Amino acid sequence: MSFKEHKFWKRLRNRFIAGLVILTPVVITAYVFILLFLKVDSLLGPLIYRFVGWEIPGMGFLAILLLIFFTGLIARNYLGRKFIGFGEKILTKIPLISRIYIALQQISQTFLAQKRAIFKEAVLIEYPRKGLYAIGFVTSQMEDGKMLGIFLPTTPNPTSGFLLFLPKEEAVPLQMKVEDALKLVISGGAVAPQGKLWDLKGKPGREGEA
């Protein structure tokens, strides 16, 4: 193979990889959205079909959105809050169901509440042993700020993880935004902000490393 041919195939390969990098997240995102749309649409779609008499694609999805909207609308007024409160009292008195409902309610209030920032700060902690470091997120402070509640996410799915409690001085603040730290976790360390990321107990920060 001549030098020109080698250069041509190298350029061709680079263009192909560049296109793959751009299209992969787009295709996966579209695929996940379509699956979610079809799943949600199938919840109320058959019920609408029974009343209307013909299948309307997307009506089940639209019905779910309207149901969520009107539930929130009802919950904003006095009578709606009383009615919802009455329903919650019934659910919390049913064995087994009450535990599931309360747990899901606490999770939804934590992750969906607009008035509360879930992750206050991104930190570096020694985990699972000395000499190994993991990225965690401060969720709470206890004992007059001496202890921190740390959520330690898993890679590449940051919605699952562990809840740890440790002294404040053992958490090294990361010199990056929470959003950037999440990108670092999700990408498995591949997407790292440039510059000084942390200072390990007085040691020089590592330039561009994670």
Image (cartoon, rainbow, N blue to C red):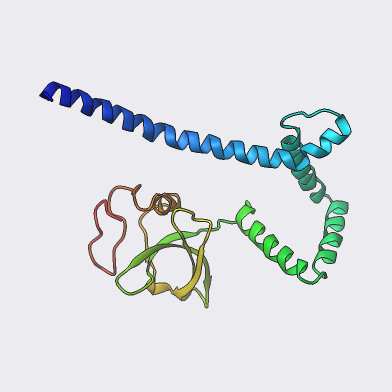
Residue at position x 32%, y 74% in the image: 130
12 to the left or right of 48: left
Would you place residue 17 above or below residue 165 in this image?
Answer: above
In front of the other: 163 or 38: 38
Count all numbered tags in the image, as a single digit: 0
Residue 55: percent from the left, percent from the top? 78, 29
Residue 54: percent from the left, percent from the top? 82, 28
Residue 168: percent from the left, percent from the top? 42, 73
58 to the left or right of 138: right
Would you place residue 27 above or below residue 157 in this image?
Answer: above
Residue 201: percent from the left, percent from the top? 29, 70
140 to the left or right of 17: right
Can residue 180 be seen? yes
- In the rendered image, the quadrant that contains the N terminus is top left
In front of the other: 119 or 161: 161
Residue at position x 71%, y 65% in the image: 100
- In the rendered image, the quadrant that contains the C terminus is bottom left
Q: Residue furthest left?
A: 2
Q: Residue furthest front?
A: 1
203 to the left or right of 86: left
Quadrant location of residue 102? bottom right
